[in-house]
Image (cartoon, rainbow, N blue to C red):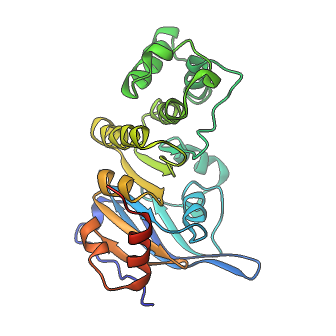
Amino acid sequence: MEKEKIQFANTEDVVIKIEGLYKSFGELEVLKGVDLMLQKGENLAVLGRSGSGKSVLIKILAGLLKPDKGNVTMLGKQLNQLKPKQLDELRLRMGFSFQSSALYDGMSVYDNLSFPLTMNVKHLSKKQVNDAVEEALDAVGLIDKIESDPEELSGGQRKRLGIARTLIMKPEIMLYDEPTAGLDPVTCAEINALIVEVQQQYKTSSIIITHDLTCAKNTCERIAMLIDGAFLKIGTFDEVFATDEEQIKKFFSYNFTL
């Protein structure tokens, strides 16, 4: 299997640059020399089967794991050179939408959004906080749920709330971890549309970790196919799946439904 070679004309517009990334757990090699670039304003999907290394990759990008070898440069900052305080400052420029939504069930919808804002941005007035919460909820179509508790929401609404909580910090980069996992087809379509709306309204650059081909096709300009810890093919959806590579063909045939 030959690893995909990355070439970009406009490197000044690259907001994430991944070079030679390796990660193992004991004798288990998960990432085997991963290279990838994300352009400013781009949605890019990382596709792969369970165990292919997708979740490990996004945790490294979020600074939750350290690679064994290789570099990640994000918004001009090399992650392995940052001190903890500097990494925290960089994380404020990123939004991380967890697969589980990671909500505080003991807090109302309003408090789930106001809490990270007031913790990270000091000296805001009550009106400024209220306006920011309402803007984020309006962006994901949940303004009518502002006084609800998260446990009262459907699975799709919880996903929306998780995205709203990242938007309240006005991130430059969004990292989505399996945004449509466990959702019915109609709700998946709504989340896919929301991801595109977030890209357009907030001018975000996003990496979307998923095994959902419909999500990748409908939300992303490019696809990166992760097979056995390395990118086998990178390009548009049609470019990636117009291939004779057997592993990619099997992934497409098993997973893709319109």
- 88 relative position to 72: left or right: right
Residue 236 visible in the picture = no
Residue 86 point in image, percent of width and height:
59, 49
Residue 75 point in image, percent of width and height:
42, 55
The residue furthest top is: 127
Depth order, front residue of 160/116? 160
| Residue depicted at 51% across the width and 15% down the height | 146
Displayed quadrant of residue 15: bottom left
The residue furthest bottom is: 1
Displayed quadrant of residue 203: top left
Residue 130 point in image, percent of width and height:
48, 13
Depth order, front residue of 171/194? 194
Residue 124 point in image, percent of width and height:
52, 17
How many marks can you see?
0
Depth order, front residue of 100/190? 190
Image quadrant occupied by the N terminus: bottom left
The residue furthest left is: 9
| Residue depicted at 66% across the width and 51% down the height | 84
Q: Does 141 sit above or below residue 225?
A: above
Residue 94 visible in the picture = yes
Q: Does 113 sit above or below residue 44?
A: above
| Residue depicted at 44% across the width and 54% down the height | 208
Q: Does 257 sit above or below residue 196?
A: below
Depth order, front residue of 179/167? 179
| Residue depicted at 60% across the width and 24% down the height | 112
Image quadrant occupied by the C terminus: bottom left
